[in-house]
Amino acid sequence: MLIKIYPENPNPRAIQQAVDILKKGGLIIYPTDTVYGLGCDITNQRAIEKICAIKGIKPDKANFSFICSDLSNISDYIKPIDTTTFRVLKKALPGPYTFILNANGHVPKLLSSKKKTVGIRVPDNSIAQEIVRQLGNPILSASIKDEDELLEYSTDPELIHEKYEDRVDLVIDGGYGGNEASTVIDCTTGEFEVVREGKGSLEDLF
């Protein structure tokens, strides 16, 4: 199923449709402020396993991120952070960054890697934020890749729907996506180490 949602003014009924699918253990593809994401409810073990099957990876080896609606949402899943890290997160989010932080006991056991870390995202996209807000907990998310040699990520929601319609329950057309992923920053040691250069600049945060 493909539905159009305008990011400037997301239709509450369409947002609720996406939330209902997630609550039933379904998978959705949705827009962010960077690339399109494949997501599910982080509390649904079977849904997580379905995403892992699509991506061809084991849950404990996966580098998924949690899509949160705001900073208060984040504190439910990470260990306490220092003032400097909090200030950086507050300045960066919502925005095109993924922060790797030390996970606490609320992270689903299926996803607990030996490193005990979690990637946290708050996209600057009203569709993603509204879905998470209405759902009441984060979405587990993975980027939608493209087989094209020139484009690393799929950007056209209609083509994404053609490719994934048999494997996901809903594709949200929120307009063309970007082809540059979020910048990944590891904060687990108290330093700020860029693991992957992406759309967000580390220099902008200091």
Image (cartoon, helix red, strand yellow):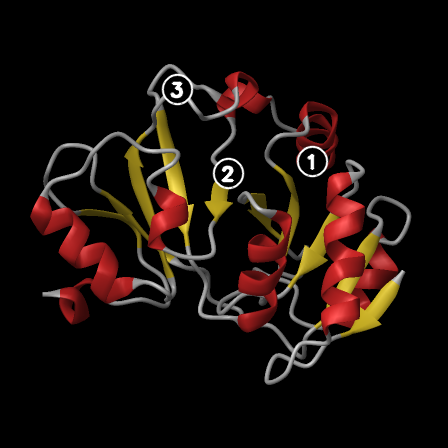
Q: CA distance from mark 2 to mark 3?
A: 17 Å
Between disc 3 and disc 1, whose residue precedes?
Answer: 1
Position of residue 191 in the picture relative to residue 135 (left or right): left
Give the crowd class for mark 1: few <14, some 14-19, many >=20 residues within 10 Å. Answer: many
Query: How crowded is the residue under tag 3: few (<14 C-alpha within 10 Å), some, or many (20+)?
Result: few
Q: Which mark is residue 64?
A: 2
Please name the residue shown 62% across and 55% down the image: 134
Q: Amino acid at mark 3?
A: Gly
Q: Secondary structure at mark 1?
A: helix
Distance from the alpha carbon under mark 3 to that under mark 1: 22 Å
Does the rendering let one see residue 52? yes
Quarter of the figure that contains the N terminus: bottom right
Asked if labels 1 and 2 touch by Cβ distance under 8 angstroms, the answer is yes
Position in image of residue 36 (x %, y %): 61, 62
- The quarter of the picture where residue 161 lies is bottom right
Residue at 80 percent of width and 59 percent of height: 17
* Image mark for residue 184: none
Q: Where is 192 relative to 206, above or below?
A: above
Mark 3 vs 1: CB contact within 8 A: no
Measuring from the top left, give residue 87's x and y in whole percent: 15, 57
Q: Position of residue 99 (x, y in %)?
A: 31, 47
Vertical position of residue 179 compared to residue 47: above or below: below
Q: Quadrant of the C terminus?
A: bottom left
Task: Give me the C-alpha separation between circle 2 and circle 1.
Answer: 10 Å
SS category of the residue bearing label 3: loop
Identity, as a three-letter code, of the amino acid under mark 1 = Ile
Residue at image mark 1: 51
Looking at the image, residue 128 sits to the left or right of residue 10; the answer is left
Circle number at residue 105? 3
Q: Secondary structure at mark 2?
A: loop
Q: Let me know if residue 178 appears in the view.
A: no
Instruction: Say left or right for 128 vs 19.
Output: left
